[in-house]
Amino acid sequence: MGRNCDVYKAPLNCLTTKDGHDYTAFKNRTESGKQCQYWSTTSPQSHSCNPEEPGNYCRNLWGSGECSSKAAPWCFTTNHKKRWEYCKIPFCKGKGKFATNFRYTYFEIKTLLSSDVVN
């Protein structure tokens, strides 16, 4: 008997839009290489952004004030001298090829993450 494969919506490790609001992958360093601060912590950078955002990943959050939308994914840094910085995330190959509601199998995810990113 055939075995069913679970379908998983994988976060793409590339941008599908210029502002990156749909970016949910795992880059956690800024364009200059600084480590991103966890969104749930307020040290060394004090902030009032969404503490429920998991991890210390680059994001372009919807919000207001200092947490408002920026031009691209960004994060607060763990560097005392640099409050926040943009993250360098490549665009996905093939304009319009991906949509945020696509669903992929495990094998398709491996292929996408390893080959569908341009530098």
Image (spheres, rainbow, N blue to C red):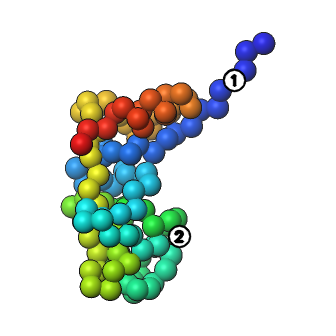
In which quadrant of the rendered image does the C terminus lie?
A: top left
Position of 81 with respect to 10 (left or right) is left
The answer to whether any part of residue 63 appears in the image is no
Q: Secondary structure at mark 1?
A: loop
Q: Residue furthest right?
A: 1
Looking at the image, residue 101 lies above or below residue 32: above
* Residue found 38% across the figure and 84% down from its top: 45
Q: Earlier in the sequence, mark 1 or mark 2?
A: 1
Look at mark 2 in the image and give the residue it sits on.
Answer: 52
Look at mark 1 in the image and give the residue it sits on.
Answer: 4
Image coordinates of residue 98 in percent, x first then y, are 35, 34
Q: Residues within 10 Å of mark 2 (few under 14, many from 20)?
A: few
Image coordinates of residue 115 in percent, x first then y, are 36, 32
Q: Tell me the amino acid under the disc marked 2.
A: Glu
Number of labels in the image equals 2
* Residue found 27% across the figure and 33% down from its top: 93
Q: Secondary structure at mark 2?
A: loop
Distance from disc 1 to disc 2, alpha carbons, whole Å, reads 33 Å
Of residues 27 and 24, the one nearer the viewer is 27
Q: Tell me the amino acid under the disc marked 1.
A: Asn
Looking at the image, residue 76 lies above or below residue 72: below
In which quadrant of the rendered image does the N terminus lie?
A: top right
Position of 40 with respect to 81 (left or right) is right
* Residue found 34% across the figure and 33% down from its top: 116
Position of 107 with respect to 13 (left or right) is right
Q: Are marks 1 and 2 in contact (CB under 8 Å)?
A: no
Image coordinates of residue 86 in percent, x first then y, are 25, 65
